[in-house]
Image (cartoon, grey):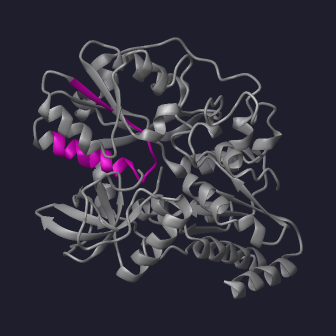
């Protein structure tokens, strides 16, 4: 339930951001963030909201282990060419 | 990693007695199994799963009322996927859906709001469950609903708070807990301050821990250091995501829309001020006020040992129903209902050991 997914911000439009998790993209709200973020920053996402900014290296390490722990298979390996818009992981 | 394990073994030599550590987060429950943490730490350390899954502890009556609301003409109930198998007194959301109740799964409460804004002739109810990690997202959605002047959007809040549950657990004195592995993402929001009473009042070593194998092992090591030196404190292991003050903005959203209330936890009972309800000034969003439905008082299932499991007194395999009449497909008790419940994790990973 309290799974938080480290996600990279690829676009910001006001207080909404597009995040990318290994090629899976979705829109999340930045409403709850306490600090400013920019494109390229990593945030922890839970239930459609970014809840905390984290450092990029930490985010990558987190994500690697998240996939291992939770056996998330629906997310395709990262590919710059064929990014599909699909649901992000878990809630 | 090897070095940390070695250090843990040395600390256990110093402590020289069996140690019981409890985690109170379903994500930890699953991560501990997946990483095989029990296999790599000394056998004298017992890892218990406390009341760490908000879906699991959702009261039977709340499920019953939500189903009744979803069956009312024109209503649609949205919820998180984890909630679907949680048994009510007769049906789970899945079973009710099969019988025609209008219940749908969303990833975010914002998806439910979006549906409400596009379908103004329907009343849209979001069944909101979760600890401090999740309640800010619901508050944020209410902020957006207010901004968009959504007249047909409602919240059924079964939100729960972690600190009062820990207090109730420690007050019961039923089980000796040597240290608490505190939930990383809950504390991302709340910070460490709400947990300081664990040390000032109960002297229980506590470490806010992340979810990777290295995080958990390090969290255990930090707890053992506190135990060995007899200096309990609330430490943060998961520093990349948790600040001492938490996320003040997310907290301000919770405080704007919600206030604490007594809440019933499945398998445990009522814990004072352990839930969140909408403040009176936000009554118009409150599904319990809008639909005002009551249902008969349900009974907790007989022979189910979840109450003992949630309090760390028994482990899942001590229950006569475990794996027999109670399975993840057909859960009877709280701990089997979500994949993050301790019984479901024991069942899935077949680790019926210590």
**Quadrant in the picture for residue B325:** top right
The residue positioned 54% from the left and 38% from the top of the image is B272
Tell which residue pokes out farthest to the right in this image.
Answer: B16
Q: Position of residue A55 (x, y in %)?
A: 36, 80
The residue positioned 65% from the left and 66% from the top of the image is B35
Asked whether B134 falls inside the magenta stretch, the response is: yes
The residue positioned 53% from the left and 69% from the top of the image is B210
Q: Left or right? Give the position of A43 relative to B84.
A: left
For the residue pair B297 and A63, the one nearer the viewer reads as A63
Q: Left or right? Give the position of B328 relative to B245.
A: right
Which range of residues does the magenta coloring cover?
Answer: B123-145
The residue positioned 25% from the left and 74% from the top of the image is A80
Residue B109 position (above or below residue B118): below
Q: Position of residue B319 (x, y in %)?
A: 79, 36
Tell which residue pokes out farthest to the bottom in this image.
Answer: B3
Residue B188 position (above or below residue A48): below
For the residue pair A11 and B22, the one nearer the viewer reads as A11
Tell which residue pokes out farthest to the front in this image.
Answer: A81
For the residue pair B256 and A11, the one nearer the viewer reads as A11
For the residue pair A18 and B135, the one nearer the viewer reads as A18
Tell me if I can see residue B321 in this picture.
yes
Q: Position of residue B293 (x, y in %)?
A: 38, 14
Quadrant of the rendering where the N terminus of chain B is positioned:
bottom right
Asked whether A67 falls inside the magenta stretch, the response is: no
Tell me if I can see residue B201 in this picture.
no
Q: Position of residue B177 (x, y in %)?
A: 75, 58
**Quadrant in the picture for residue B120:** top left
Q: Left or right? Give the position of B24 relative to A61.
A: right
């Amino acid at each position: 339930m309290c799974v938080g997914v480290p996600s990279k911000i690829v676009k910001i439009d006001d207080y909404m951001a597009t995040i990318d998790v290994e090629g899976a993209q979705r829109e999340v709200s930045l409403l709850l963030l306490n600090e400013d973020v920019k494109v390229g920053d990593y945030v922890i996402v839970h239930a459609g909201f970014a809840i905390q900014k984290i450092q990029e290296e930490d985010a990558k390490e987190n994500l690697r282990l998240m996939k291992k722990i939770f056996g998330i298979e629906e997310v395709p390996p990262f590919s710059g060419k064929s990014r599909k818009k699909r649901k992000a992981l878990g809630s | 990693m090897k070095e940390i394990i070695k250090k843990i073994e040395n600390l256990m030599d110093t402590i020289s007695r069996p140690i019981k550590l409890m985690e109170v987060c379903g994500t930890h429950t699953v991560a501990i199994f997946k990483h095989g943490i029990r296999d790599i730490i000394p056998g004298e350390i017992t890892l218990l799963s406390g009341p760490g899954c908000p879906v699991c502890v959702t009261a039977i009556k709340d499920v019953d009322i939500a189903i009744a609301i979803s069956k009312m003409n024109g209503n649609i109930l949205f919820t998180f996927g984890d909630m679907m198998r949680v048994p009510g007194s007769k049906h789970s959301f899945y079973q009710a859906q099969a019988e025609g109740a209008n219940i749908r799964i969303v990833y975010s409460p914002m998806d439910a709001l979006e549906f409400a804004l596009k379908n103004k002739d329907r009343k849209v109810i979001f069944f909101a469950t979760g600890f401090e990690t999740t309640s800010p997202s619901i508050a944020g959605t209410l902020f957006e609903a207010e901004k968009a002047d959504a007249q047909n959007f409602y919240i059924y809040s079964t939100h729960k708070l972690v600190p009062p549950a820990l207090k109730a657990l420690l007050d019961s004195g039923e089980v000796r807990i040597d240290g608490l592995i505190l939930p990383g993402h809950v504390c991302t929001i709340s910070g460490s301050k709400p947990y300081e009473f664990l040390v000032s009042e109960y002297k229980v070593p506590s470490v806010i821990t992340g979810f990777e194998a290295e995080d958990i092992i390090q969290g255990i090591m930090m707890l053992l250091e506190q135990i060995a030196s007899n200096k309990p404190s609330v430490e943060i292991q998961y520093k990349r995501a948790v600040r001492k003050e938490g996320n003040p903005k997310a907290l301000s959203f919770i405080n704007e829309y919600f206030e604490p209330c007594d809440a019933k936890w499945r398998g445990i009972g009522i814990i004072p001020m352990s839930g969140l309800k909408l403040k009176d000034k936000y009554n118009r969003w409150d599904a319990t006020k809008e639909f005002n439905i009551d249902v008969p008082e349900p009974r907790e299932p007989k022979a189910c040992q979840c109450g003992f499991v949630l309090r760390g007194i028994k482990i899942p395999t001590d229950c006569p129903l475990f794996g027999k009449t109670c399975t993840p497909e057909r859960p009877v008790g709280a701990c089997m209902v979500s994949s993050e419940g301790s019984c479901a994790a024991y069942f899935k990973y077949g680790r019926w050991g210590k």
